[in-house]
Image (cartoon, rainbow, N blue to C red):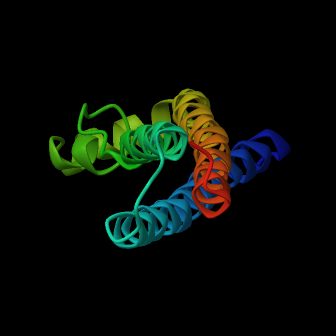
Amino acid sequence: MSATDRDLIAAHAEVKAEIARTDSKTALLLAFVGAVLAGTWTVARDVPLTVPALVAGSLGLTLLVAAVALLLRSVRPNLSGRHGFPLWATLTADEIDAVVARDLAADIAGLSRLAVAKFTCLRCAVDLTLTGGALLILAALLTAGGAR
């Protein structure tokens, strides 16, 4: 095995590991945002809210729901058949050998684009979660302070 082959195999493994790490982070953030949404709903329905608190809280919840949409988009299965299982499921054993032998570099490029797309969705979802959380904290402070 040449040094180039080893480098390609290492790069392929690195990209796949990055996708797995991004998916793990996405799952954790999705669980966290779900808990925040559930907790906010539980508290907010039993507390009399002022108009400013209602506006800030509504904006915060909207941003959290947008974050959930981005997170779900990030982990949505890619069934287009370009990489991984869907592609292999459509090929015969001989075709799989030919595809694997043909171009590992093309697979690395495709997986890298997938990793960047997932990472971008995750980063935007984190930003929305932070902003939404800040608005929920503002709503809680407005409610506790009794601002009208």
Residue lying at 18% horizontally and 49% vertically, measured from the top left: 89
Picture residue at 44% right of the left edge, 46% below the top: 61
The image shows residue 75 at horizontal and vertical percentages of: 40, 49
Residue found 64% across the figure and 46% down from its top: 126
Image position of 127 with respect to 85: above or below:
above
* Residue 1 visible in the picture: no
Q: Tell me the quarter of the picture where residue 20 sits.
A: bottom right
**Viewed as shown, does residue 82 lie left or right of 89?**
right
- Left or right of 39 in this view: 91: left
Closer to the camera in the image, 22 or 97: 22
- Residue 34 position in % (x across, y down): 41, 64
Identify which residue is drawn at 48% across, 36% down: 55
The x, y position of residue 70, in whole percent, is 44, 38
Taking depth in this image into account, of 28 and 51 the one nearest to the observer is 51
Q: Is residue 27 above or below residue 14?
A: below
Residue 66, image quadrant: top left
| Residue furthest right in the image | 3
Spot occupied by residue 40 in the image (x, y as percentages of width and height): 44, 64
